[in-house]
Amino acid sequence: MTLVKTKIGRRAFIRNTGLASGGLVLGFNWLASCKMTPEQVNSLPNEWFDLNGFLKVGDNGLVTIMSPNPEIGQNVKTAMPMIVAEELDVAWKDVIVEQAPLNTDIFTRQLAGGSQSIRQGWESLRMAGATARHMLKEAAAQAWQVPVSEITTKEGQLMHEASGKSAGYGEMASAATAIEVPEEVELKDINTFSIIGTDKKNVDGPKIVTGQPLYGLDVQREGMLIAMIVHPPAFGMKYKSMNAESVKSMPGIKDVFHFEPYTDEVEKQWSDGGGIPELVAIVGNSTWECMQAKKALEVEWEEASKLESTAYHDEALAALLEKPTEQPARKDGDVDAAFKKAAKIVESTYSAPYLAHNTMEPMNFFAHVTPEKAELLGPIQTPEFLEKTLVSRLGMPAEKIDIMMTRMGGGFGRRLYGTFAVEAAVISQKMNAPIKLVYSREDDMTQGTYRPSYKVKYKAGLDENGNLIAWHVRGAGTNDDLVWEHRFPAGAVDNYLAEKHVLPTNVTTGAWRAPRSNFIAGAEQAFMDEVAEASGKDPIEFRLELFDRAINNPVGDPEKNDYDPKRYAGVLKLVKEKADWNGTDNGKSRGVSAYYCHNSYVAQVLDLEEGSGTPRVGKVWCAVDCGIVINPLSAKNQVEGGIVDGIGHSTFSAMTFTDGKPNQSNFDKYRLIRNMEAPKEVETFFVDNGIDPTGLGEPSLPPIIGALANALYKATGRRHYSQPFISDRPPLVG
């Protein structure tokens, strides 16, 4: 039996009367907002009763469950309510899901990032359902004058076996709201789960396939104006002047003005990184009229700092790789001495370019700021931090700022940085009107917040028996330090040295799906294969030997290591079995890779098949240890999406700069993967270990890059050290 407290620190967990009877519930009700039959309309409750901030029960037994975290396609809007429904013990068919607004009094960590939504919300979501179930049982016990311990539940029904009495949740909902919240509640045994671990379709599916309003770009309000921005053409430039007056007279244009999203007095949050300091706003009646005004507007910009180029970044990063750091990130043993006595040394350097996020829905946000309040609505991964910034920027207390979240047409880290929402609020405040800010694709791709560019240098030493005795990694990134010093093979080799440099640049960068790992994993795993080949060992067996060392005789303090070597080795053994590796390539050009990030373990085998003289990705086997899987259908989709994303960006994509100006502004020059280039088949296997859930939205992306690089080597006899791979080879199509 698992008991959990219903308080987290000083935060009283459950009751919030501000949501009573559905009066303040905001969001997107997929059941009630679709076209409904008369029978469905009649089935809706006449009255709702709040049992806690996460859920309310209708008088007819329907249950509305709030999904607190932003939805960016990772399907938390389905998975999080599944957890609540499981502990509540309600039939899934009787559940309505709504997107919760920002409410820091009820919810913790209303953030989509780091693949942590389920991991961080696991206990509180279970607690919400279990607490409501307890209160309903208590209400039934009081009504029937029987001990609460004799009340059982099943799929929204309360039962007392001895007396034969039963009632639906709806019949007891009103009485349950008066029950005092218990100090602790009992959670279900995971072996009794009936909702968690089963396939559930996306609750927004009906709206998505029928094109109903869900996204920020769908927002329409009475009197709403459209705003678009003009930003400097190059990084390192600032505003000088423009022909605003002539553009203001164009049809539909309300105003054109220069503004600074962040003044010097603003107390910035970490989520305010990557914004352009000075912008020009064009406000009009329609997107089309604003776009025409943008074409007519002549803005003069001047140089404020060095206009950096891609070549400068490449050269500067390469120079850093030749410099030891003053203080290593981690040092075990004596690598210099080990290299001197090594029988064989392997050295390789890997690099990767800047990447744009390129969400299918460009940045946008609705804002209506008046002297009395601020209402904001749009696609944002960090609403809590946006609120803090707006308090400072608008000069308005938090209780007067309402932030509601729409579903996002992609995030991948770009919408962690809410600068576009701040811009919308500032423009609305100046115009004293409701505003929807809309970025064009070109605005989105050229204004920054890119995945940093990276370089990393590896050096490994082997003894005469092919055993790894020394490992040295030194990495450098633009505005980022790249190296994870406590990840594998740290703790598995006697002499280990990790160093990292940062190259400051004026190109704005930020988190991109699986930050740092999206490059370092592929480089590490490609180099691991190269070292395995030099040792004369099978690449999987070479890795497993190192894991055995980390398990049985770890180097240094094993508590410092980020990973569990048993779980790490477990996914590698599983994918070896499922792919029928058997120590050979089975006549295929295949590569293997394994990586740990976001608290989860992933191992992959990728097969290339020959077609028309050039390799194509045939099949990928993927083993995942992410603890309990909430929704297998969604989990497989996330894994497959990460695999396709990793293959596509490492093979085709790059952002480059000339004198600070981005050379790519749309998909005609920024290459993404095509349908025909995606793997023909992906087979995913989840480790069933009963461990609490960990991350899943990002972990499948990083290792696939290494598996692809290793398979390419098998197919071509040439190793790939620079991304995108397409830059020095034909495309992977048959």
Image (cartoon, rainbow, N blue to C red):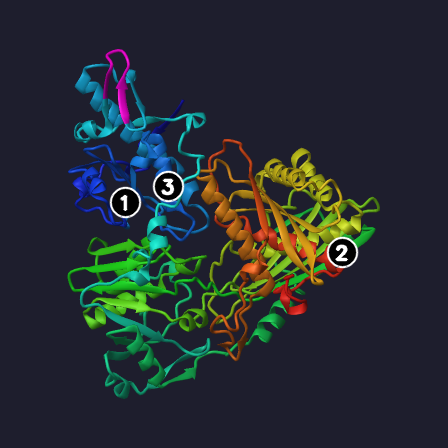
Circle 2/circle 1 CB separation < 8 Å? no
Disc 1 to disc 3, how far (Cα)? 17 Å
Name the residue that disc number 2 marks: 346
Lateral position of residue 35 relative to residue 700, left or right: left
Q: Is residue 164 magenta?
A: yes
Q: Residue at coordinates 76% horizontally, 59% vertically from top-left?
A: 717
SS of the residue under disc 1: loop
Depth-wise, is mark 1 or mark 3 nearer the camera?
1
Q: Position of residue 184 (x, y in %)?
A: 31, 27
Q: Residue at coordinates 58% horizontally, 60% vertically from top-left?
A: 677
Mark toward the start of the polypeptide (3 vs 2): 3
SS of the residue under disc 2: strand
Depth-wise, is mark 3 or mark 2 nearer the camera?
3
Magenta span dominant secondary structure: strand
- Amino acid type indicated by mark 3: Met
Quarter of the image where the C terminus is located = bottom right
Depth-wise, is mark 2 or mark 1 nearer the camera?
1
Quarter of the image where the N terminus is located = top left
Name the residue that disc number 1 marks: 31
Q: Residues within 10 Å of mark 1 (few under 14, many from 20)?
A: some
Task: Point out the stretch of residues depicted in magenta.
Answer: 157-166
Q: Residues within 10 Å of mark 2 (few under 14, many from 20)?
A: some
Disc 2 to disc 1, how far (Cα)? 60 Å
Q: Residue at coordinates 40% horizontally, 33% vertically from top-left?
A: 195
Residue 56 higher or lower than 673, as above or below: above
- Camera-nearest residue between 293 and 522: 293
Name the residue that disc number 3 marks: 80
- The part of the image, by quadrant, that contains residue 323 is bottom right
Mark toward the start of the polypeptide (2 vs 1): 1
SS of the residue under disc 3: helix
Q: Position of residue 67 (x, y in %)?
A: 32, 44
Q: Position of residue 28 (x, y in %)?
A: 28, 50
